Amino acid sequence: MKVGELASAFGLEVLTGSVNLDREIQAGYTSDLLSDVIANIEENAVWITIQRHINILGVAKLKDIAAILIPRNLQLDQEVIDKACTESIAILRGGLSAFELSGLLYDALKRG
Amino acid sequence: MVDTFQFTPKINLEFTIREKDFFLAGESASRVKKTLQQLGMEQEIIKRIAIIIYEAAMNVAIHASHGMLRVFISPEAITIETEDAGGGIPDVDLAMREGYSTATHEIREMGFGAGMGLPNIKQCADELKIDSKVGTGTLLQATVYFTNWQEKH
Ligand SMILES: Nc1ncnc2c1ncn2[C@@H]1O[C@H](COP(=O)(O)OP(=O)(O)O)[C@@H](O)[C@H]1O
Ligand SMILES: [Mg+2]
């Protein structure tokens, strides 16, 4: 499943325009502890987190993350969105909780 | 390991890390990772090295005032070194414990300060040396050998 397909399937908002919409998603990970993400997230994963400061982009870049997914329609600074575009990192946002989004993503990835 | 890497000469990389400049600390880890990928190094080893660099550099940005990140690459091993000026670590054994952190509430709110950095570095490195002087600073050296990971784990 591609990032763009995930967004349309679950009605997610795409905050970063066309960035990485064609990227294939192979895994998912839900965590707000950066050390945990750095150590355990797989490549090409969607990272579900409520962290929204600029440092999540460093993590996303280092771990080659397919997209960051922000739950509960939480607000992001424009600075972070702009930087994500420059760094080619997709940021998606949904109205559901991290728990619910994780469940949807899990199902979608299992179905392939 | 890919053959081309065997013949690569020694490479040293150096980055400055400033207090609370988390983005730059993360960025240096990404840059080293890219260099290692270009050298054709094995994915698994690159992953471990990336974790070490990120955590060590973040520790300087979070817990010290400023410092240097140096990466020494030879055909046999890679050594990641951070040398900082800062408060130092009074009890290194305690600092190595999983979950131990002196990070402030503010830092924790950003998702840092889980107390997993040093344990993760230890887990990923074949050798780890921490030399710290309270009130002066910390020297951390982590080495990954290109051959003996299997033997150790
Ligand atoms: N470079 C450093 N300078 C001073 N103190 C440090 C440094 N690195 C680590 N420490 C101390 O060791 C503790 C544990 O480090 P670590 O395992 O990386 O967890 P965290 O960074 O999440 O607090 C830190 O909270 C801090 O007290
Ligand atoms: Mg740390």
Image: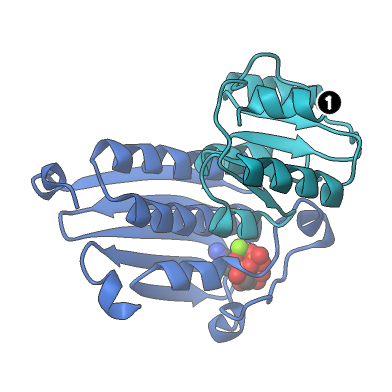
Chain colours: A cyan, B blue
Name the residue tied to disc 1.
A11
What is the three-letter code of the residue carrying label 1?
Gly
Front one among A107 and A63: A107
Q: Is residue B21 in view from this perspective?
A: no
Residue depicted at x 55% and y 59%: A39
Secondary structure at numbered mark 1: loop
Measured from the top left, where is residue A85 in percent x and y? 64, 20
- The quarter of the rendered structure image containing the C terminus of chain B is bottom left
How many numbered marks does the figure carry?
A: 1
Mark 1, Cα crowd under 10 Å, few <14 / some 14-19 / many 20+, is few
Measured from the top left, where is residue B54 in percent x and y? 51, 52
Measured from the top left, where is residue B3 in percent x and y? 11, 46
Q: Is residue B133 left or right of residue A89?
A: left
Q: Where in the image, quadrant-wise, is ligand 1 located?
A: bottom right
Q: Farthest front residue?
A: A111
Front one among B148 and A18: A18
Q: Residue A91, relative to residue A102: is it above or below?
A: above
